[in-house]
């Protein structure tokens, strides 16, 4: 019984590690804001509580820490929202 439980736990751990790796690989890094805004009209925010420093925007940003981190270079005003519109 102990051997069976350890095999099941090992398989579960292996699956969770491979799933986390696949999710990380799915995050896309864009070369500029024009490309990012084709997929995310309002840009990408790090958290849902992030406030825009630059004034009013037309669209609400998509919230994803992983996507923001991959495209942090596109956040020119450093307000934690990349390519806001």
Image: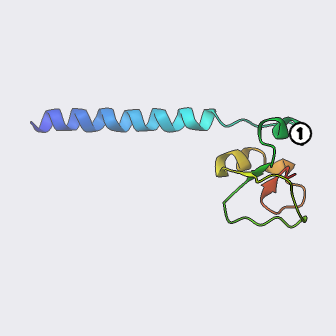
> Going by the image, does 29 lie left or right of 22?
right
Residue located at (73% from left, 64% from top):
50
Q: Position of residue 24 (x, y in %)?
A: 60, 38
Residue in front for this viewpoint, 6 or 79: 79
Q: Position of residue 56 (x, y in %)?
A: 88, 63
Look at the picture and state if 51 lies above or below 9. Answer: below
Residue located at (21% from left, 37% from top):
6
Q: Residues within 10 Å of mark 1 (few under 14, many from 20)?
A: few
> Going by the image, does 18 lie left or right of 52?
left
Colour pattern of the rendering: rainbow
> Going by the image, does 29 lie left or right of 20?
right
Residue located at (63% from left, 33% from top):
26
What SS does tag 1 mark?
A: loop
Q: Position of residue 62 (x, y in %)?
A: 71, 49
Figure quadrant of the N terminus = top left
Residue located at (67% from left, 59% from top):
47
Q: Which residue is tagged 1?
A: 32
């Amino acid at each position: 019984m102990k051997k069976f439980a350890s095999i099941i736990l090992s398989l579960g751990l292996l699956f969770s590690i491979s799933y986390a790796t696949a999710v990380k690989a799915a995050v896309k890094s864009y070369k500029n804001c024009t490309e990012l805004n084709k997929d995310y009209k309002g840009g990408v925010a790090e958290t849902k509580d992030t406030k825009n420093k630059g004034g009013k925007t037309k669209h609400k940003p998509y919230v994803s820490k992983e996507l923001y981190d991959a495209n942090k270079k596109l956040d020119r005003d450093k307000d934690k929202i990349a390519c806001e519109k």
